[in-house]
Image (cartoon, rainbow, N blue to C red):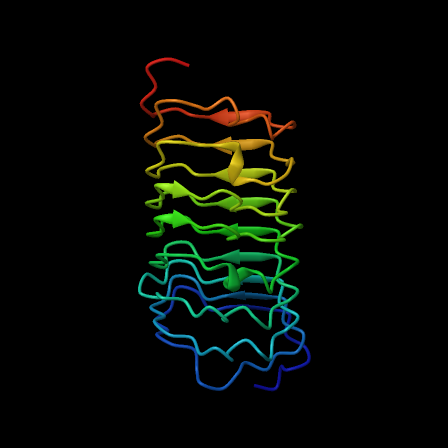
């Protein structure tokens, strides 16, 4: 390509790309990569080995891109923003994210996730924004957010939750905004919010409350 040591940002969204080639991208200074709104069905495990400086990766709206390889972002230790919205994702494995310690935002809107398991967001101490809206999440296991104490915005809008407990966190948090709207909530436990001393905004509209 001749841009190996100069290109900082690459946007190739809204095309007809179906796969990322079998040879790793070699763009030593690349910081932002946008592959959204394509038809990607496959990305080899080693595809991102040559862009280790990447801080922003957008793979959203590739609706047939599932299952996503567990080691996909393994080389991207400096990644700060990851967008996997509308990719058909059905589950998130802790191994998928725990190699991205600098992750600040993760967008998983509009997928088919049904459950968040223990340790899904383990040790992501820099994580501040998590968007899990419009999935099929019916269960969040205790300690899903182990040591992810700096999250400020969490959206669980448009899921199938009938309970929300503070036990999904294992420590006090920096949470300021929580969106629980459009779920199946009929009751909130006393521990639901006690662990979030900085909480300023709660949206619990369009649930099934008979009393509050």
Q: Residue at the spot x=34%, y=48% of the render?
A: 114
**Where is residue 80 drawn, in percent x and y?**
62, 57
**Where is residue 186 drawn, in percent x and y?**
34, 23
**Where is residue 46 drawn, in percent x and y?**
51, 80
In this orientation, which residue lies closer to the viewer: 114 or 166?
Answer: 166
Q: Residue at the spot x=51%, y=40% of the render?
A: 168
Q: Residue at the spot x=47%, y=39% of the render?
A: 155
- Determine the residue located farthest toward the top in the rendered image: 211
Q: Is residue 199 above or below residue 151?
A: above
In this orientation, which residue lies closer to the viewer: 70 or 32?
Answer: 70
Q: Quadrant of residue 137?
A: top left
Q: Residue at the spot x=59%, y=47% of the render?
A: 146
Q: Is residue 153 above or below residue 32?
A: above
Q: Is residue 30 left or right of residue 192?
A: right
Q: Quadrant of residue 25?
A: bottom right
The total number of labels drawn is: 0
Image quarter (top left, top right, bottom left or bottom right) of the C terminus: top left
Q: Is residue 178 above or below residue 65?
A: above
Q: Is residue 121 above or below residue 212?
A: below
Image quarter (top left, top right, bottom left or bottom right) of the N terminus: bottom right
In this orientation, which residue lies closer to the viewer: 71 or 57?
Answer: 71
**Where is residue 167 drawn, in percent x and y?**
52, 36
């Amino acid at each position: 390509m001749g841009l190996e040591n100069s290109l900082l940002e690459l946007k190739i969204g809204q095309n007809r790309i179906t796969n990322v080639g079998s040879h790793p991208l070699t763009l030593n200074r690349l910081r932002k990569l946008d592959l959204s709104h394509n038809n990607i069905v496959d990305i080899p495990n080693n595809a991102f080995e040559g862009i280790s400086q990447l801080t922003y990766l957008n793979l959203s709206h590739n609706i047939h891109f599932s299952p996503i390889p567990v080691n996909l972002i393994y080389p991207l230790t400096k990644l700060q923003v990851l967008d996997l919205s509308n990719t058909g994702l059905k589950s998130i494995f802790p191994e998928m994210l725990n190699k991205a310690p600098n992750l600040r935002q993760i967008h998983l809107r509009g997928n088919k996730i049904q459950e968040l398991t223990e340790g899904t967001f383990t040790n992501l101490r820099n994580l501040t924004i998590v968007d899990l809206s419009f999935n099929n999440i019916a269960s969040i296991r205790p300690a899903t957010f182990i040591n992810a104490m700096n999250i400020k915005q969490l959206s669980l809008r448009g899921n199938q939750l009938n309970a929300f407990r503070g036990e999904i966190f294992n420590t006090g948090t920096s949470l300021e905004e929580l969106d629980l709207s459009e779920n199946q909530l009929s009751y909130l436990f006393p521990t639901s919010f006690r662990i979030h001393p900085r909480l300023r905004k709660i949206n619990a509209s369009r649930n099934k409350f008979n009393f509050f």
